[in-house]
Amino acid sequence: MITNVIFDFDGVIAEQGFRQALAELTPDNNVELTDIAKQGMRALLKSGYVTGQGSEADFWALLSVSTKLVGDSATLRAAVIRCSSLRPQMLALVDQLRSRGVPVALLSDHTDWLDEIAASTGLAGHFDYFYNSYHLQRSKRDPLVFDQVLTLMGRNAEQTLFVDDNPANVERAIDRGLQGIVYQNYAQFSEEMSALGLAKAVINAAED
């Protein structure tokens, strides 16, 4: 039985701000955005910025070599923050879960950009637990991050549902004993969540 839920941020709780920001800064419409996004994530990981072990300058230096983005790191930061629009329906569902005694957490592979997003939107107030790879110093590429978060939460893996739009992250969570849903869209997500035993009333209330 699911007793608590961990949500990803980018692409689940919010629009894909990082991807959209990269699209805004890509002058060549013929460049495949998926490739740019992969290079962006690669630079985040290689620079150590996403785990708080490198700087934004380190990240931008790597990314600017492999891509032809316009602007600078400050331009990208501003675009990420602006493009990371919160999804009201998902926040309503999170609030409904909490109101029914289901603890909820956020676990994101993000940088200190997320601190700015949270400060300006009140995002953290919707969650019982709020975890960011930048502060954990471990990303979801490392399966042990799930053990780390569960220990911090004081929760059992088998009673925890993890929701992420990245199938590889969900697979790693399942390997650590959690249950998982790959988020594709709200309708698909709510159907799968109901199938796992979370009350349909929660979903209905969030949709009202």
Image (spheres, grey):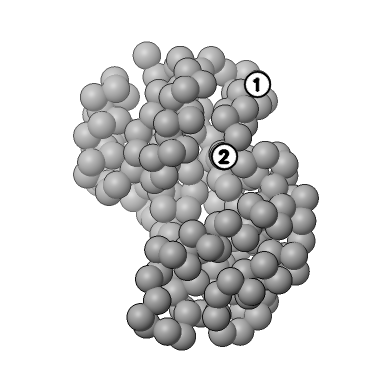
Tell me which amino acid carries mark 2: Arg
**Residue 128 appears in view:** no
Q: CA distance from mark 1 to mark 2?
A: 18 Å
How far across and how far down the image is residue 22, in percent? 49, 71
Identify which residue, 39 or 125, lies in the foreground.
39
Task: Tell me: residue 108, above or below residue 62.
Answer: above
Q: Residue at x 62, y 69 (%)?
A: 63
Quick check: 52 left or right of 87? right
Within 10 Å of disc 2 (Cα), the crowding (few <14, some 14-19, many 20+) is few
Within 10 Å of disc 1 (Cα), the crowding (few <14, some 14-19, many 20+) is few
How far across and how far down the image is residue 27, in percent? 46, 85
- Check disc 2 and report its element: helix, strand or loop: loop
Q: Earlier in the sequence, mark 1 or mark 2?
A: 2
Identify which residue, 99 or 36, lies in the foreground.
36
In the orientation shown, which residue stands out farthest toward the front? 66
In this figure, which residue is indicated by the disc labeled 1?
151
Task: Tell me: residue 32, above or below residue 113.
Answer: below
Q: Quadrant of residue 165?
A: top left
How far across and how far down the image is residue 3, in percent? 44, 19
**Residue 15 appears in view:** yes
Tell me which amino acid carries mark 1: Thr
Identify which residue, 112 or 175, lies in the foreground.
175
In this figure, which residue is indicated by the disc labeled 2?
141
Quick check: 21 left or right of 188? right
- Check disc 1 and report its element: helix, strand or loop: helix
Q: Residue at x 39, y 19 (%)?
A: 2
Quick check: 85 left or right of 111? left
Figure quadrant of the N terminus: top left
Q: Residue at x 49, y 59 (%)?
A: 38
Q: Which mark is residue 41?
A: none
How far across and how far down the image is residue 143, in percent? 57, 30
